[in-house]
Image (cartoon, grey):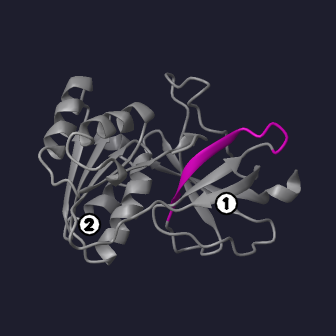
Amino acid sequence: MHDKFLSVVVTRKWQLAESYHAVELQTRCRSELPSFDDGSCVTLVRDDVICKEKIYPLCRFTSRPRAYVIAVRQDDADTDAKTADISLSQGDEAFIVTTRSPTVILDGRTQSLLFAGGVGAASIAGIATRLALAGQKFELHNFARSPERAVFRNELDALKSESRVYHHFGLDADRLEQATSHAISPVQANTQIYCSGPPAFMDLIERQARDWVYPANIHKIFLGDRRSA
């Protein structure tokens, strides 16, 4: 089964935010890994026999161009076995299955509305960067339990000169639903909606967005357990 996977080793690990870490991956011979677009995700396998697969967002760090850096959530007391991330420590071996680039519509005639929750902020930050580099305006809403748990907050704030970026902290379910509904309604039917975060969060965005935009304009970036988008 080794022939199907690209073997990598964890070379560094550091904290991104409270309860979230960045994990650097390189091949043992430090060979160059396949290139990827901002906002892309990678499927990782910790054990190529058991084949427990997880999808992680790829982060753009230029200090080591031959490495991949993924954003992971460290285990919390309320994290169950189904949502827990693969345990990754320095020196561990893992296997890359594939990378996947999200569809980003680069059309100056359309509006883009982005929603991020938890580690999904890493993917949304990449998509926002691609939009900004193309000269397109967008509106971005980032949700976290607290400012300390906001992943890529500084990177998102750096985009405020390009477009509108809002952070929402500590919202309960009702207030979160109100905030997302207010952001989505009313928008034009050709608006592009991007979201990444917990499944329930993305399902909420999708339900609300279907009242305003074409279904094909809703882009969900799935992380965690492998599933079809």
Please name whichever residue, 197 or 207, is drawn nearer the observer in this view of the structure: 207
Q: Position of residue 116 (x, y in %)?
A: 34, 47
Residue type at mark 1 is: Leu
- Residue 27 found in image quarter: bottom right
As for residue 77 lying within the magenta part, the answer is: no
Question: Which residue lies at the image location 46% right of the left edge and 67% below the top edge?
Answer: 38
The reply to whether residue 176 is in sight is yes
How many C-alpha atoms fall within 10 Å of the one at disc 1: few (<14), some, or many (≥20)?
Answer: many
Q: Position of residue 48 (x, y in %)?
A: 82, 45
The reply to whether residue 11 is in sight is no
Residue 152 as seen in the image, left or right of residue 158: right
Question: Which residue lies at the image location 30% right of the left edge and 59% below the top edge?
Answer: 156
Residue 43 as seen in the image, left or right of residue 118: right
* SS state under label 2: loop
Please name whichever residue, 174 or 21, is drawn nearer the observer in this view of the structure: 174
Query: Which is more N-terminal, label 2 or label 1?
Result: 1
Q: Determine whether 205 is above or below 159 in the image.
A: above
* SS state under label 1: strand
Q: Position of residue 139 (x, y in %)?
A: 21, 57
Residue 107 as seen in the image, left or right of residue 221: left
Q: Position of residue 44 (x, y in %)?
A: 67, 50
Tell me which segment is drawn in magenta: 48-59
- Residue 81 found in image quarter: top right
Task: Give the residue pinned by disc 1.
Answer: 25
How many C-alpha atoms fall within 10 Å of the one at disc 2: few (<14), some, or many (≥20)?
Answer: some
Question: Which residue lies at the image location 33% right of the left edge and 77% below the top edge?
Answer: 133
Task: Give the residue pinned by disc 2.
Answer: 159
